[in-house]
Amino acid sequence: MLKTAYEGLRDTLSTDDIPMPVNRDSRHDVNSDKLFRNLDCAVIRYLHDSIEAPESHLAPYDTVRGLFQEGGELYPGSAFREKTHTQIAIRNLDCIKGIFRLPDSSVGI
């Protein structure tokens, strides 16, 4: 779905003579992790706009999860990275049943 959304975004922006967004590295990121994900964000937004269009046959997603592998190898030869993390975006606010905050002493557990 993301590949098709990318192609749709590319075609739409090309028709309007708008340049494609670009994922970029942070100046201080020695691992070239593309921390500024402007292209990826635009593709995901385009996908959801397409799904939510009146002519779409697809049900909208309530949540979106992305896994980001960042940082150097955790140990030599590892596929694990030092800063790998998951991000979750709640698109349907009815899915949020409560909000809590961990005490500062829990950070890093």
Image: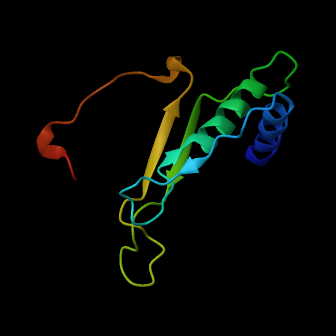
Point 76% across, 43% down: residue: 6
Q: In terms of image quadrants, where is residue 104? A: top left
Point 57% across, 40% down: residue: 38
Locate the N terminus and report the quarter of the image it occupies: top right
Residue lying farthest bottom?
76
Residues 97 and 74: in front is: 74
The image shows residue 10 at horizontal and vertical percentages of 79, 40
Query: How are the residues colored?
Result: rainbow
The image shows residue 108 at horizontal and vertical percentages of 21, 52
Q: In terms of image quadrants, where is residue 40? A: top right
Indicate left or right for 51 with 39 as reference. Answer: right
Indicate left or right for 17 with 61 as reference. Answer: right
Point 70% across, 26% down: residue: 60
Residue 35 in sight in this render: yes
Q: In terms of image quadrants, where is residue 82? A: bottom left
Question: Is 35 rendered above or below residue 91?
Answer: below
Point 39% across, 70% down: residue: 72
Question: Is 70 rendered above or below residue 57?
Answer: below
Residue lying farthest left?
105
Residue 59 in sight in this render: no
Indicate left or right for 35 with 92 as reference. Answer: left
Indicate left or right for 69 with 108 as reference. Answer: right
Residues 69 and 107: in front is: 69
Question: Is 3 rendered above or below residue 53?
Answer: below
Residues 18 and 72: in front is: 18
